[in-house]
């Protein structure tokens, strides 16, 4: 079958949507399906590129000044470009990844085309409202975002989300069927085994216990709480905090580490290429995350697949992934004392860390990317069976006709 993923963000903007599509897409192709991706181009021109072996159709777009990595489509050419892409690719299934400009436009077009369509939700409003000042204004903005979400996602047959926590969050907002399917992780790529010597040398990792954070360095990640706890824990135990990633908070976090007097114990790696990332997990002893807006947390899955214990805030889906005192510890938001105690307990007790790591390896099996791919294949086939055959043929003819008209 021909499967078309649609998203308002994609490579080179690295996020959960990109990682989901770039991993499941090639596996679907290996199973004999044709896979394409629609996303903003990196320029104001229509583009067609190949990323991770997938054809990526780039919609002309412009960057957002306050967040240059995010690009928005140029409105007046959006519909014409989508008609051209769908007419050329002729998808059997359209799989949207959000409810913003491009995906919303595809949904509107599909009222006539009637191509079977499903959606996956990676969205939590906290990821977009974190910089909004004032509770009242933030609430208004969140309600606006949820309204747009419901409007778009109510027009698809099935909505998936990576965890049951995420499913509970959106079920009351939708008429569409909602089900939890993990975004998946490659258990071959992230595992406890591998020689880390070159990585240790490349990033200057000292010979001491390593506490690891991987992810965006943005306000909603609450990394400042981790720094406070590390400052407290360092008075009892010598270890290194490794912070992997980039974001708008990087400079302020570097300043905070100096103010806390712990900069000699904290390494900010900045951007790390994908080929180095598994080794940074392997050389670490524990993973930590304080983000309150996670529908899954790919980095936590990667840590678990590498056999690490995890210290996580009990918020979002993290409480579903981390079982307190089994494969790590959960703490309440802002509870610096609890974070400190968890860090000291794990880094001071290697045997306990190993046992918790074994539990992580046990729990991660349900997130194997191959299982995820099979679940989505089954969902695509069931969506096709539920779609009247004559509607599919009509849809294809209408798209081709509109594309041809657009070229005249």
Image (spheres, grey):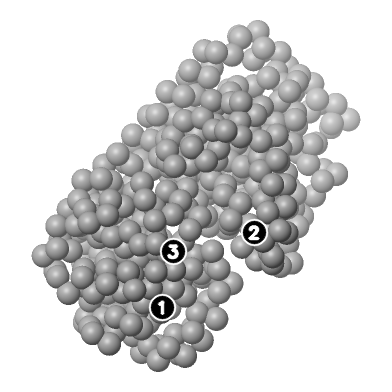
Residue name at image x 66 percent, y 43 percent: 146
| Residue hosting label 2 | 129
Q: Secondary structure at mark 1?
A: helix
Whether residue 250 sits left or right of residue 274 in the image: it is right
Q: Which residue is mark 3?
A: 333
Of residues 391 and 315, which is closer to you in this image? 315
Please tell me whether residue 402 is drawn above or below residue 82 in the rendered image: above
Q: Is residue 204 left or right of residue 99?
A: left
Figure quadrant of residue 273: bottom left
Locate residue 72 relative to residue 17 in the image: left or right.
Answer: right
For mark 3, give the secondary structure. loop
Pick out the residue farthest to the left. 351
Point 33% across, 70% down: residue: 339
Residue 227 marker: 1
CA separation, marks 1 and 2? 23 Å
Residue at 21% x, 46% y: name it. Answer: 362
Relative height, residue 322 to residue 161 (above, below): below
Placement of the C terminus among the 4 image quadrants: top right
Residue 27 on image: x %, y %: 40, 37
| Side of 74 relative to 200 (left or right) | right
At horizontal 14% and vertical 57% (from top left) the residue drawn is 355
Residue 248 appearing in the image:
yes
Q: Nearer the viewer, mark 1 or mark 3?
A: 3
Residue 161 at what x, y percent from top left?
Answer: 49, 38
Between disc 1 and disc 3, whose residue precedes?
Answer: 1
Q: Residues within 10 Å of mark 2 (few under 14, many from 20)?
A: some
Give coordinates of residue 106: x percent, y percent: 70, 33
- The front one of 194 and 297 is 297
Gap in Å between the C-alphas at discs 1 and 3? 14 Å
- Residue placed furthest toward the right: 408
């Amino acid at each position: 079958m021909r499967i078309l993923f649609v998203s308002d963000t994609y490579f080179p903007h690295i996020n959960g949507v990109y990682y989901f599509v770039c991993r499941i897409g090639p596996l679907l192709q290996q199973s004999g399906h044709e896979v394409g991706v629609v996303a903003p181009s990196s320029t104001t021109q229509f583009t067609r590129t190949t990323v991770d072996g997938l054809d990526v159709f780039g919609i002309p777009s412009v960057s957002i000044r306050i967040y240059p990595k995010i690009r928005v489509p140029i409105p007046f050419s959006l519909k014409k470009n989508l008609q051209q892409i769908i007419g050329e690719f002729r998808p059997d299934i359209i799989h949207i990844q959000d409810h913003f400009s491009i995906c919303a436009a595809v949904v509107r077009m599909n009222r006539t085309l009637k191509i079977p369509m499903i959606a996956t939700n990676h969205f939590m409003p906290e990821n977009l409202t974190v910089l909004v000042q004032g509770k009242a204004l933030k609430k208004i903005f969140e309600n606006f975002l949820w309204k747009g979400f419901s409007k778009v996602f109510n027009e698809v047959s099935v909505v998936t989300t990576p965890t049951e926590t995420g499913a509970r969050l959106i079920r009351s907002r939708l008429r569409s069927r909602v089900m939890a399917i993990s975004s998946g992780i490659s258990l071959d790529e992230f595992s406890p085994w591998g020689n880390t010597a070159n990585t240790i040398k490349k990033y200057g990792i000292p010979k001491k216990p390593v506490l690891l954070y991987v992810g965006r360095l943005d306000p909603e990640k609450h990394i400042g709480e981790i720094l406070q706890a590390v400052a407290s824990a360092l008075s009892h135990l010598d270890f290194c905090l490794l912070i992997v990633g980039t974001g708008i908070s990087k400079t302020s976090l570097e300043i905070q580490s100096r103010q806390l007097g712990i900069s000699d114990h904290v390494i900010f790696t900045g951007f790390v290429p994908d080929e180095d990332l598994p080794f940074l997990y392997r050389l670490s002893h524990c993973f930590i995350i304080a983000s309150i807006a996670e529908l899954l947390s790919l980095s936590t899955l990667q840590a678990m697949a590498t056999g690490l214990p995890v210290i996580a805030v009990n918020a979002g889906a993290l409480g579903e992934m981390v079982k307190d005192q089994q494969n790590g510890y959960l703490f309440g938001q802002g509870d610096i004392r609890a974070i400190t105690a968890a860090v000291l307990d794990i880094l001071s007790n290697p045997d306990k860390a190993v046992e918790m790591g074994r539990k992580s390896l046990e729990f991660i099996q349900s997130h194997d990317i191959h299982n995820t791919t099979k679940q989505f294949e089954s969902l695509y086939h069931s969506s096709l069976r539920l779609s009247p055959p004559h509607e599919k043929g009509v849809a294809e003819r209408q798209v081709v006709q509109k594309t041809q008209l657009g070229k005249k």
